Structures are given as C-alpha cells and as structure tokens.
Image (tube, grey):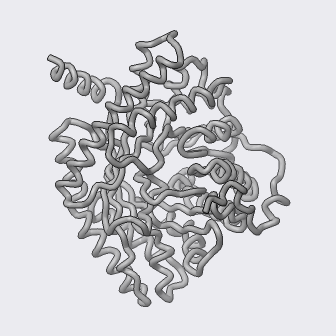
Amino acid sequence: MNEFNKIMETIKMIEKENLDIRTITMGISLLDCCSSDGKESRQKIYDKITKKAENLVKVGNQIETKYGIPIINKRISVTPISLIAQASNDTNYVEYAKVIDKAAKTVGVDFIGGFSSLVQKGYSKGDKLLIDSIPQALYETEKLCSSVNIGDTKSGINMDAVKHMGEIIKKTAYLTRNNNSIGCAKLVVFSNAVEDNPFMAGAFHGVGEADSVINVGVSGPGVVKAALEKVKGESFDTVSETIKKTSFKITRAGQLVANEASKLLDVPFGILDLSLAPTPAVGDSVARILEEIGIENCGGHGTTAALALLNDAVKKGGIMASSHVGGLSGAFIPVSEDEGMINAVKAGSLNIEKLEAMTCVCSVGLDMIAIPGDTPSSTISAIIADEAAIGVINKKTTAVRIIPAYGKTAGDEIKFGGLLGKAPIMAVSKFSSENFIQRGGRIPAPVHSFKN
C-alpha cells in the first residue's frame, strides 16, 4: 500500500503540479578540436558534437516514455569557444557559432551553450574576438546561447569587460530588434560562473570536466506550492521541513533520470542541479511559492526572507537525494518565465531594485528582465557591475540576462513564447552611470578572497 501511495503521489505531481525534468544537458569537451586552420577546427567541432550527442534526444524521449516524467529540454554545452577558436588565425568567430548551431539542429536539441568567454581577470586574443562576435552570432543562429564571465571572488570584477558587455547587449538587441530583441534572451553575463551548469543561457563545459558528461536540471515549483498549501498558517519551521521533504522527492526523480540517461548514452553522470526553475504556465511559479509563504504580492516586504528560506530548504532537502549536486542549485527568479513574477511587476509590487535584493539569496541573478530599448549601454553595464558585486562579495554565482527591447518603453510588453514567456518592460533609474563605467580597470578582489 505504501509503494502504491508513492506511485500515486508522483503521478499527481506530474499531472497536476507541473513536476518535470527541466533539462538533460550533455557536456562535450572540444579541446581536441583546436587547429590553426579555422575551417578544419570547425569541421572537428561539428563531427564531435554530432557523434557524441547523436542519441541524446532519442534517449531523452525513451526515458520520458518509460517513467512518464516529462523532460522539457534536451541540451548541449561545449567548451568555451574562445579557448578553441583562438588557436586559429580567424579574426571573427561567427562561423564557429553557425557550425555549432548547425550541429545542434542536426542532433535535434533545443539549445546549445558555450559560445562563451572567461575574462574575469583579463582578455586573451580569443576572448576579445569572441565577445565582439556575439551580436552577429546570435543574430545568425537559432539554438546558440552565449555567456561571458566578467568577475569572480578570487579576481575581482573586470570593469573593462563590464563596459564592453553593456555595449554588446545593446548591439545584440538592435540586430535582433525585429524579433523583440530575442538575442539578448540567449546571452548572460556572469560572476563566479560554474563549469557544470545545465541551464541556458549560461551553460558551458568547463576545462576541468570529463570529455563528456550528463548533467540534469530538475524543476517543480508547482509541487512545492501544493505542499505548502497543506500547512497554511503554520510556523516557519514547518514551512522549511515541508519544502525539504518535497525537494527530496523532486530530486530523487531527477537522480533516476540522470542515472538512466548516463547508462543508455554510456556517458558519465556529472551533476544534478537542484534549481527550482519556473515556466510561464500557471501553477509553476516561484513567485507563487513566496506568496503562499505569506507575502500578499511577490516583491512586498518579507519577500527576500521568504526566498532565502525557500532556497536553503530546497538545497537541504535535495542534497541528500543525489550522489553529486552541482550547477547553480537554488530558486530561479526569471521575470518573463514566471507568471507570478509577471503579475507582480504589473501590480507594482516588484521592481528591478527589489529583484536585485532578492538575488543576494537565490539563484542566479537578474534574469530575463526586459527594460526600455533606449537604456544607455552604461546603465546596462552598471546593472551588471552591481550584480557582479553581489556575487563576488558573497562568493556565489550571480548573473544578468537583460533585454533592452528595441522600440519599447516602460509599461509595454514583449512576447517570446515557449519557456521564454513574455516580459513586461521594467523601468530603470533615469540617473546616469556613465562616469562610473568610463573609469575602466578592475575592482579588486575582496579581502576574504585570500584563502591560501
């Protein structure tokens, strides 16, 4: 009877509470694809991706059918392309982007990440070329995702790169203006980026990883909210325990899928990412969890404390359910991908300043936020700098995925569809950060970075 009840509980979580596996992501090393001949390198890249990942989608579908657990996305992450392409004599990396995108289409995955660069302490030749190639690369591709790491706790914040990325984001928004500046939805700026993140747009395959691995990202905000509905009015101790127990169940489902995918693909299991990733679907919202905890509208006073409790309890519950936990692991708060967040912005309870405060305690940062298209690049850079400072000082991963929607102003809305959802245009400060961003150089690492 107990086993039957567990089965019925899982079925209910899938059918009524939006439990899913958000992604199976295969990480693939491209270090053996370097060549002084760019054309040869790109052919090696295409061949390796299409060989390694040829069965990824098929296996994902088999697991869905076998266990009845929806797997929303099948994805690939690759070695940061700045490291691979700089071995060639190419002076523009758009062709690399197009080949990677072509490989993704060949194997049928939803997204491929790794058009990336790590410049927390400075630029190599390949870093500058890759970053300058990002706007055109995202304009000419469909499945490609890009990321740049501009700071970490050991190195501080590369403010030259921060300035550069504000300009790159504006260029990307302009080039993809006929599609609601969607290129910016596939570009993220990190501090303390991790090497095993299965979530887009920030996934890349770190140089410390195996030749190929399987990383899985779980989800289930709807399941957590449903569990909390049963403990209305009870203490925070009860709330925490309820989230922990629910997170354990969600994570066990993810571990099951990860083990099966690893076995069927004959690829080592890497990590399970415990993140609660929302979707635009009603009932699958992190914001609604915070409101269930007691906040009238997400963004109201107490939101940050509620989010801190949620994030901590998810990790405590999930970490016992998997042999290897990694990635970002926490509660995501992407505005366009969470119907509760969208509602909170429209109601006036949630603004960009409150979102910044919330990122101090969650994963991963200012995510999928649309702002007026005429926002200066220096303001975007300053937003990136603020978020990077939170990450660097607190030794946590933070990121900015922001969309200056071309031709749109505060109060308008843009629609992407699918998991990317729709985004209300949020106001930003009217006061200039130009003189701050023009200083350049590096913000030094914090004193507590000296651990050796």
Which part of the image, by quadrant, shows the C terminus?
Answer: bottom right
Is 4 placed left or right of 191 in the picture? left
The location of residue 279, given as percent across then percent down, is 43, 37
* Relative to 381, residue 285 above or below: above
Q: Which residue ends up furthest to the front in the rendered image? A: 452
Q: Is residue 386 visible?
A: yes
* Relative to 287, residue 444 above or below: below
Near-viewer residue (265 or 339): 265
The total of numbered circles placed on residues is 0
Near-viewer residue (58 or 359): 359
Q: In the image, what residue occupies the spot 60% across and 44% down?
A: 369
* Relative to 212, residue 225 above or below: above
Q: In the image, what residue occupies the spot 57% across and 56% down?
A: 192
Is 95 placed left or right of 356 in the picture? left
* Relative to 400, residue 339 above or below: above
Q: Which residue ends up furthest to the top in the rendered image? A: 233
The location of residue 146, given as percent across then percent down, is 50, 62
Q: In the image, what residue occupies the spot 25% across and 27% down?
A: 10
Is 447 placed left or right of 182 in the picture? right
Q: In the image, what residue occupies the spot 68% across and 24% down?
A: 301
The location of residue 143, given as percent across then percent down, is 40, 59
The location of residue 74, given as percent across then percent down, is 31, 52
Q: Is residue 169 visible?
A: no
Which part of the image, by quadrant, shows the N terminus?
Answer: top left
